Amino acid sequence: MFKIFNKLSWFIKYYKKYYILVLITMIISNILIIIPPRLLGIILDDISSKTLTLEKLYTLVAILVVVVLVHYGSNYIWSYYIFKASDEIERVTRFRLMKKYLRQSPKFFEKNTTGSLMGKATNDVSMISEFAGYGMMAFSDATLYPLAILIVMAFSVSFKLTIVSILPLPLLFYATKKIETILYARFEQVQRSFDRLNDIVLENISGVRVVRSYTLEKSQTKEFEEECLDYYEKNMNLVKVASIYGFISRVIPGLSMVITIIYGTYLIGVNDLTIGNLVSATLYINMLVWPMFALGDFATIAEQASASMDRINEVLNYKEDLIDNENAIIYEGKGNIEFNNLDFYYPTSKYKVLDNISFVLKNGQSLGVVGKTGSGKTTLVKQLLKMYNLKEKSLKVGKNYIEDLNTRSLREKIGYVPQRHIVFSKTIEDNIKFSDSSKTHEDVEKVVELADFKKDLSQLPQGLNTMAGERGVSLSGGQKQRISIARALIKEPEILILDDSLSAVDANTEQKILKNLKEYRKNKTNIITAHRLSAVQHADLIIVLDNGKIIEQGTHEELFMKDGWYREQFIHQQLKGEENGE
Ligand SMILES: Nc1ncnc2c1ncn2[C@@H]1O[C@H](COP(=O)(O)OP(=O)(O)OP(=O)(O)O)[C@@H](O)[C@H]1O
C-alpha cells in the first residue's frame, strides 16, 4: 500500500512545497476539530457539578467560534492545494507520456497497441491523479487525524479507555494487508480490459466504412458487447473485494464504539470516569469512523494508482531502441547514398526482408525502386530515416555511416511521403505547413502548384482554408497524396522520398508532378517507389527488388534491353495503358 509513495516520489518532490503547506494546514485543522468535543465535555461536567458560570460559558463559546473559523480557513487552504495536485500530476504525466510516445521508433509501436497507449494517457493518468489529490487527503485523514484524536482522548479523557477502545483496530490493518495484493491484480485486469476496449473502438471507428460495406455491424457490435461484458466483469471483481473491505472498515469503528460505551460505563461505576468524559470519549470514537473509511479508500486508491503507475512506467522507462552516439555527426544534407551488402530483419521477422543490398546513388540523382508487392521497397527507402538498428555498418549517407549520424539532423534533411497518407485536423494550408511552420502563404501556393493540387482548390469550400482531417471535409485518396507531397516539398528537403505516393493519381497528373519535380528539384536527390513503372522511367538509377534482393539495376534503357522482370512489366503496363486510353 505504501509502495505508491516510492513510485510517485518524483511528483512528491516536484510538488513538495505545496504538500508541506497542505500538511501544516491539515495538522492545524485536525487539532482544532478535536477541541469542540472537549469543550462540550467541560460544559457538561460543569453543569452536572453546578459550577458553570455565565462568564465561563461565554468564554467557552467564544473559543468555540474562533476554533471553528480557523478550522474552516485551514480546510480551505489544504483542500485547494491538494486538489491542485490532482490536476498538476495529470498535466505533467500526460506531457511526459506524449513526449515519450513521439520519440519512439516503430518497434515500440509494434509492442504497444494504440488502445493501450491511449488507456495509459487517459485512465491510468486519472488513477494517479486521484491518488495525488483525494488519495493523499485520505492518507492524512487515516493517519494524522485519528492519531491526534487518540492522543487528545488519552490525555484529556482516559488513557485506559482509549487503549481498550482501539483494540479492534489491528483487525483493520490485517484486512488491509491481506486485500492490497488482490486489489492490485484485479485493478490491473480492469485496465488491460480497458485497453482492449479502446482498440476495438478505434479500429471500428477508423474502419467504419469497411464495417458498413461488408455489413459487419452486427458481428462487430457483438464483439464490442463481449469486450464490454468482460470489462464489466473485471470491474465487478474489483468492486467485490473493495466492498468487503468497505464493510470491514465500517464494522470496526462500530465495534470500538460498543467497547467504549461498555467499558466507559464500568469506569463510571467504579468512579474512574465522569459522565462528561464518557460523552467526550464517544464523540471522539465517533470521529474515528471517517478515518477508518478513509483508510479503506486510501488502500484501494493506492493499489489502483500503483498498478497504473507501473503501467505508465512501462512506457516512461522504455529504453529507446535508437539512441544517438554522444558525438553523433550532424548531417549536412549532401553526398552520395551508399548501400553496401545491407541485410535487414524487422524485430518480428524470421527471414531477411532486405538481402545483400548494394548500390550507390550519387548526390542529386534520382532513384526508382520497383518490384512485386511485398518485395521490400518501403523497407529499403525507410532505412534512410534511421528507424531501426542495422546489425552491421552497411549504409552510408554522405560521408558517414547512418549509425554515426545525428538522427534529427538526418530526418530534417529528408522529405518522406509515406504510403499511408495522414491528414491532420487542421486547414489544408496548415497541413502543408505542418513540416515547417515558418513557411509563408506564398510558399504554400508554390508547392500546391508543384504537387498539382491547385486545380482541386476551387472544388473545396474555402480553398486552402478548408478544414481537413477528422473534423473537416472528406478528401479523395489522390487529394490526400498530393497534400502529403506538398507537405514534403515545402521543407525543401535534400532527399525526397515518395513511397508509392503517385498510385492514386491518374497518369497525366503523375507525369505533371514528375515534370515539376525534375525542374524544381534539380541537383537534389529524389527517391520514388512505385508499381507503375512510368513513375520511375526517367530516374538516373532504377533498382528492381524481388524477395528483398536486387534482381536488376540500371537506367530504363539498360533495363529495357535486358530480358527481365522490368522489361516484361513495362510492356505489360504500356499495353494496359493503351487499352485504358491513357
Ligand atoms: N513492421 C514490420 N514488421 C515485420 N514485417 C514487416 C513489417 N513491415 C513490413 N514487413 C514485411 O516486410 C516485407 C516487405 O514489406 P514492404 O512494405 O517493404 O514491401 P513493399 O515492396 O513496399 O510492398 P508494397 O508494394 O505492397 O507496398 C513484407 O513481407 C512485409 O510483410
Image (spheres, rainbow, N blue to C red):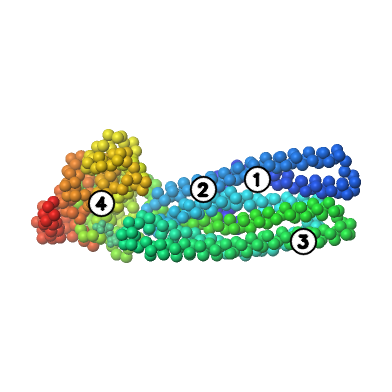
* Residue at x 46% of width, y 46% of height: 95
Residue type at the position of mark 3: Val
Question: Of label 4 and label 2, which has the lower sequence position?
Answer: 2
- Circles 3 and 4 in contact, beta carbons < 8 Å: no
Q: Is mark 2 on a helix, strand or loop?
A: helix
* Residue at x 82% of width, y 61% of height: 263
Ligand 1 near label 4 (Cβ, under 8 Å)?
A: yes
Q: Is residue 363 visible?
A: no
- Dot 1, crowdedness within 10 Å: few (<14), some or many (≥20)? some
Percent across and percent down for residue 534 are 16, 51
Percent across and percent down for residue 352 are 28, 62
Ligand 1 near label 2 (Cβ, under 8 Å)?
A: no
Percent across and percent down for residue 499 are 25, 51
Q: Is residue 323 toward the left or the right of residue 124 in the image?
A: left
Q: Is residue 515 toward the left or the right of residue 383 in the image?
A: left
User: Mark 4 — residue?
Assistant: 499
Residue type at the position of mark 4: Asp
Q: How far apart are marks 4 and 2 (CA)?
A: 39 Å
User: Mark 2 — residue?
Assistant: 90
Question: Of label 2 and label 3, which has the lower sequence position?
Answer: 2
Q: Distance between the residues labelled 2 and 3?
A: 43 Å
* Residue at x 14% of width, y 58% of height: 569
Question: Of label 3 and label 1, which has the lower sequence position?
Answer: 1
